[in-house]
Amino acid sequence: MGSALQNTLVFGLLIALGVIMRLRISKKSEIKGVKALILDVALPATIFIALLKIEINRELLLLPFMALLMNALMILGAMISAKFMNIPRRSKKFRTIMMLFPSFAPGLSCFPFLIEYFGDEALALAAFADVGNKIFVLLILYLLAMRWYYQKLGKEDSGELGNKQKIKALILKLVSEPINIVLVLGVLFLSFGLTIDSFPMFVKGSLDRMSLMMTPLILIFIGLSISISRRSFSKIFQVLMWRTACAFLISTVLLIFMPAQVSVTILILIVVFPQSSCSFWPYAHMSSVESLERKKSNSSATFDTKLGLNLMAFSLPLSTTIIIAICSNATFFVKPTVTLGAASLFVFLALIPLLLSYAQKLFRYGPLTLENGLSQKVAKRYSA
């Protein structure tokens, strides 16, 4: 049995353990405690160790901009996907999809598999790329959410002070996050020629033990977070299939234009990073807007927060499955023809609910009725 297959089976067992543990850990506060332990302790320690084992170069400093480019292209993909799903542009569903679709949460869905399959260098590169993504999900998406909120109220100039204070708070949050702190510290230590071996044994040993917790905790957390609901499943399925297809298409474009001398690790990152699950931060911004709307009894909802929560819940296990498949066959997936084929497959999967709906109508009403209905719609459009 190959090492990649063995890793995949181990990951599957740990995720299954998380699913079983839901019988004992059902409170949201307990699950949040596991998440806090991952993001504030295990993951920063792992990233810090990984950073102090690599060399800084120009390639590294370009990664945040590459992640921001991925976010921007995913926004375009969200707009195109919403059009295919017949979601009106001024609807709360459209705004919700536009918030979550282009966001990435690599810490929970991408980082553990990169380090397990490809080592410290891959994790360090992904952590640097995530800086650009964090700027996008913390600041840019917040500004977008508030813009839609004030546009809907017709008061774009109101609440400027509160808006500025919120932006300052988000910048402070960006600076004070443990992952970002260790990134800055890691770069500073490297600039002074310090490596992980420069630290005393008790510091290095503590960091190593904290790092060992990361992968098992994240996999168990994924199992704890899986929640399957039949409500709105068709729409959630469509959105996530389109999102996966767009991510593979972006990877295809980037792989084509990458220089020949780029390392294999960067190529793997280009394919894996955009497959990360939806971030929590867009949902947090939408919840903030919802709390503002509760204070105004006559205000209609800007976002569909229930849809947003379901998209987050379903995106994590889907992203995990896809990322494990990519990491298990890395040399196969770094080819543009393969990623383009994968994008086409997920476009087809996204169209299945639409095809089933059409087939159901065809079976119920017959082709003649559908044709007459379509002719009447066309006639009304031209007579208007």
Image (cartoon, grey):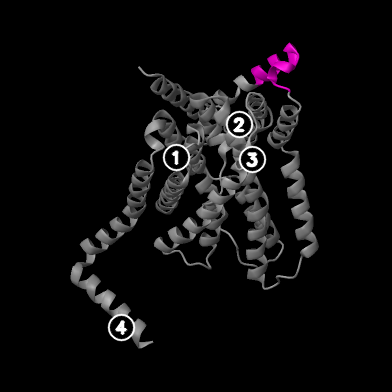
Residue assigned mark 1: 318
Residue assigned mark 2: 124
Residue assigned mark 4: 379
Three-letter amino acid code of the residue under disc 4: Ala
Front in this rendered view, residue 99 or 269: 269
Question: Given this view, does label 2 or label 1 mark the residue nearer the observer?
Answer: 2
Marks 2 and 3: in contact by CB < 8 Å?
Answer: no
- Magenta stretch secondary structure, dominant: helix
Magenta-drawn segment: 194-210
Judged left or right of residue 12, residue 53 is right
Which image quadrant for residue 195? top right
Q: What SS does tag 4 mark?
A: helix
| Rendered view: 257 above or below 377 | above
Q: What SS does tag 2 mark?
A: helix
Question: Given this view, does label 3 or label 1 mark the residue nearer the observer?
Answer: 3
Residue assigned mark 3: 61
The CA distance from mark 3 to mark 4 is: 57 Å
Does residue 27 appear in the picture of this structure? no
Which image quadrant for residue 229? top left
State the image coordinates of residue 351 (x, y, percent, origin top left): 34, 55
Does residue 363 appear in the picture of this structure? yes
> Alpha-carbon neighbours of circle 4 within 10 Å: few (<14), some, or many (≥20)?
few
State the image coordinates of residue 66 (x, y, percent, origin top left): 57, 46
Instruction: Give the mark nearer the N terminus: 3 vs 2.
Output: 3
Marks 1 and 3: in contact by CB < 8 Å?
Answer: no
Write the residue at 27% across / 75% down. Answer: 373
> Alpha-carbon neighbours of circle 1 within 10 Å: few (<14), some, or many (≥20)?
some
State the image coordinates of residue 63 (x, y, percent, origin top left): 59, 41
Q: How many marks?
A: 4
Three-letter amino acid code of the residue under disc 1: Leu
Three-letter amino acid code of the residue under disc 2: Ala
